[in-house]
Image (cartoon, rainbow, N blue to C red):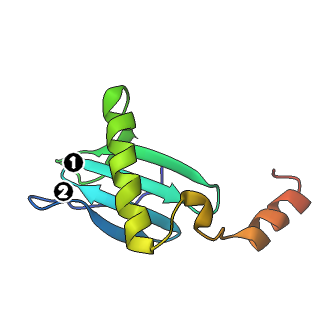
Amino acid sequence: MFGVGLAVASCGGPRYERRGPLHCVVEGRHLYTFDPVWRTEEIHRIDPATGLPLDEAEGPLAGREAERYRRVLLRELGVASLDSIPPEGEAELKALRALGYL
């Protein structure tokens, strides 16, 4: 996981946040992330006691909510698709590959 504490939102719709390299959409007890380095999406539930993300959501919630949060992210960034978000960390990934870590 990425060790970022997030306060649980008490009201309102989804909101965009940038947390380090991650693009995040937070709503209530859910956290959607897009990682522009690894090009991955995840959706997590937020533990109300700690404010930290739990394991990935499973089942219908992940599919239905991921699409909605993805639309919020794309609208916020002003792009048409996740592929339009510029990749980040290319130099770091090349260095890790050169060292044999990837």
Q: Residue at x 36, y 25 (%)?
A: 59
Q: Residue 55 lies in what quarter of the image?
A: top left
Q: Residue at x 81, y 61 (%)?
A: 96
Task: Using the image as rendered, state which of residue 96 and residue 82 is in the foreground.
Answer: 82
Q: Residues within 10 Å of mark 2 (few under 14, many from 20)?
A: some
Q: Residue at x 45, y 74 (%)?
A: 78
Residue 95 rendering spot, x and y as whole percentages = 83, 67
Give the residue type that dot 2 points to. Val
**Which residue matches tag 2?**
8
Give the residue type that dot 1 points to. Arg
Label 2 to label 1, Cα distance in Å?
Answer: 6 Å
Q: Residue at x 28, y 61 (%)?
A: 6
Indicate which disc, 2 or 1, sits on the residue closer to the N terminus: 2
94 left or right of 43?
right
**Which residue matches tag 1?**
29
Q: Are marks 2 and 1 in contact (CB under 8 Å)?
A: yes
Residue 38 rendering spot, x and y as whole percentages = 64, 55
